[in-house]
Amino acid sequence: MLPELSFFYAAVPAVLLVGFAKGGMGDALSLIGVPFLALVVSPVEAAAILLPILVFMDIISLIIWRQHGDWTTLKIMLPGGLLGIAFGWATSALVPADALRILIGTVMVLFCLRYFWNNFGPGAGKVVPPRGQRPILASAWATLSGYGSFVAHAGGAPFQIYALPLKLPPREFTGTSVRFFAILNAVKLIPYFALGQLDTKNLVTSMTLLPFAPLATIAGAWCVRRMKPEIFYPFMYIMAMIAAFLIIREGLGF
């Protein structure tokens, strides 16, 4: 049985916003979109409805960004991301998701403030070189990303904390992010099925929203392809800052 029409007034904007984010326009749009859907269904049901749509968006994004991505970053972060999902599945009933949201959001705010201080504060103009790869730190942030993605739907912030300072070209950054979260979302289907969250009702609802996914994802990718690095990175840090405040707000229950 399909939801009432009023459901789609919130669900369609939610899918469009998440699609823009999947196209590469920043995690904040996704975090804005999820509460839209949570206005008409429970947060748990909203996550279950969105997961198959996210996987479909990931497929589209992988096609769009198939020629872009930094394989070194992906290879050193992916094992930690998968470990984080496994740890989240095993401890999801033990660790308060709200506490994790507040922690991740606070770290992300400090991370973004440091960027804006370095680039627009008293020392503005000083060139900050790209960070080199740091496998141990990459594994730590990736594990938190996988864990946050499973428990609190906040996996983007830890990934960005490690990946943004690498200063990859915008297309390579986006391609790496798309691959990383496409794999994590596909793997998350297993525990979501095991926990009984992907029942027939939610899957049917997901199918009714799928037609909106390609439009938004392609539109987001179109914007990223036309951004120069000097525009892309300030934009991404602003979106990350917004995402951080949204994560903290959700953790505080506002």
Image: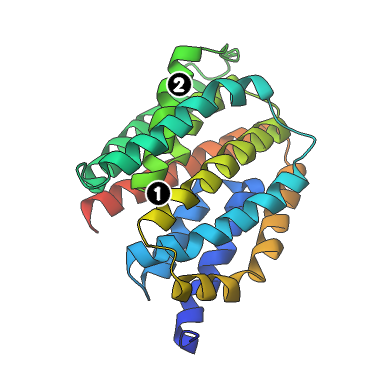
Disc 1 residue type? His
Colour option used = rainbow
Q: Is residue 18 visible?
A: no
Residue 118 visible (yes or no): yes
Crowding at label 1, few (<14), some or many (≥20) Cα neighbours within 10 Å? some
- In this rendering, the answer to whether 95 lies above or below 42 is above
Q: Is residue 194 left or right of residue 100?
A: right
Q: Position of residue 100 (x, y in %)?
A: 27, 40
**For this view, does 208 lie left or right of residue 93?**
right
Q: Nearer the viewer, residue 208 or 119?
A: 208
Q: Secondary structure at mark 2?
A: helix
Pointer 2: residues within 10 angstroms few (<14), some, or many (20+)?
A: many
Residue at the far right: name it: 67
Q: Which mark is residue 1?
A: none
Q: Where is residue 124 shown, x and y percent of the image?
A: 53, 20
Q: In which quarter of the view is residue 140 placed?
A: top left
Amino acid marked by disc 2? Ser
Name the residue beneath numbered marker 1: 153
> What residue is shown at x 63% (from left), y 57% (from top)?
56
- Image quadrant occupied by the C terminus: bottom left
Q: Please, is residue 67 above or below residue 212 in the view?
A: above
Residue at 51%, 44% (x, y): give it: 187
Q: In the rendered structure, find residue 139 and report the number of the disc placed on it.
A: 2
Q: Position of residue 168 (x, y in %)?
A: 66, 25
Q: Earlier in the sequence, mark 2 or mark 1?
A: 2
C-alpha span from label 2 to label 1: 19 Å
Residue at left offset 52%, top offset 25%:
77
Q: Is 56 in front, or is 192?
A: 192
Image vertical order of residue 239 relative to residue 159, above or below: below
Evaluate if marks 2 and 1 touch, with contact meaning CB atoms under 8 Å apart. Answer: no
Q: Secondary structure at mark 1?
A: loop
